[in-house]
Image (cartoon, grey):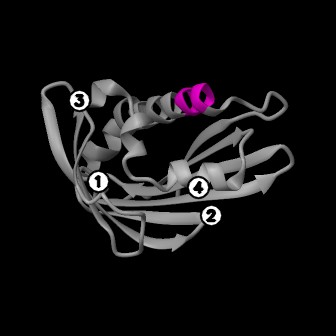
Amino acid sequence: MKLYQLKSKQYLPISQSEAWQFLSNPANLKVITPEHMGFDILDGADRKMFPGQIIQYIVKPFPGYSTKWVTEITHVQAGSYFVDEQRFGPYKLWHHKHFISVIPGGVLMEDIIDYKLPFGILGRMSHPFLVKKQLKQIFMHREQKLTSLFGSMLDKQNTVEFKCI
């Protein structure tokens, strides 16, 4: 079974506090998710983020198909990072680390996602043209949305990278 990894880096000209306030609010995930994904939070986003928090969503990754996604916030270091892990949902494994680092002129927001696909060889075959493509589109949308909300750092290049571990 293959383990895939997505790494995304985005530079924002805002304070660490402002970045944390926005990114650690589970309700803002809907703000930065493409509308066509039909993303809705069902439960668990009504409190400030804490370890052990369970958040339930509905997401429509493909036309005509919706699924429930349940994540747990497993680690929180206020202002610096948090980790969410899928408990139930479309992936065999989903471990998502969110980091916020202070840099000159703003912050570096870094996401590292380790994930495994279900369905064995069929899942692996779908990765390049379906899963990877969709994840890249989601993170490019997030980059555009965060840039429209907070601006950009023109001297820094945002990136989205994939690899198979």
Residue range in magenta is: 143-149
Asked whether 95 or 30 is in front, the reply is 30
State the residue position of label 2. 79
Marks 1 and 4 close (CB-CB < 8 Å): no
Tell me, yes or no, whether the two marked residues, 2 and 4, touch with CB atoms within 8 Å: yes
The numbered dot on residue 62 is 3
Say what amino acid the circle numbered 2 marks: Gly
Q: CA distance from mark 3 to mark 4?
A: 30 Å
Category of crowding for the residue at label 3, using alpha-carbon neighbours closer than 10 angstroms: few (below 14), some (14–19), many (at least 20): few
The relative height of residue 53 versus residue 9 in the rendered view (above or below) is: below
Q: Is residue 161 magenta?
A: no
Q: Secondary structure at mark 3?
A: strand
Q: Amino acid at mark 3?
A: Phe
Disc 1 is placed on an element classified as loop
Question: Which residue bears the numbered disc 1?
Answer: 91
131 or 139: which is nearer to us?
Answer: 139
Q: CA distance from mark 3 to mark 1?
A: 14 Å
The secondary structure making up most of the magenta span is: helix
What residue did someone put label 4 on? 20
Whether residue 164 is visible to the viewer of this picture, yes or no, is: no
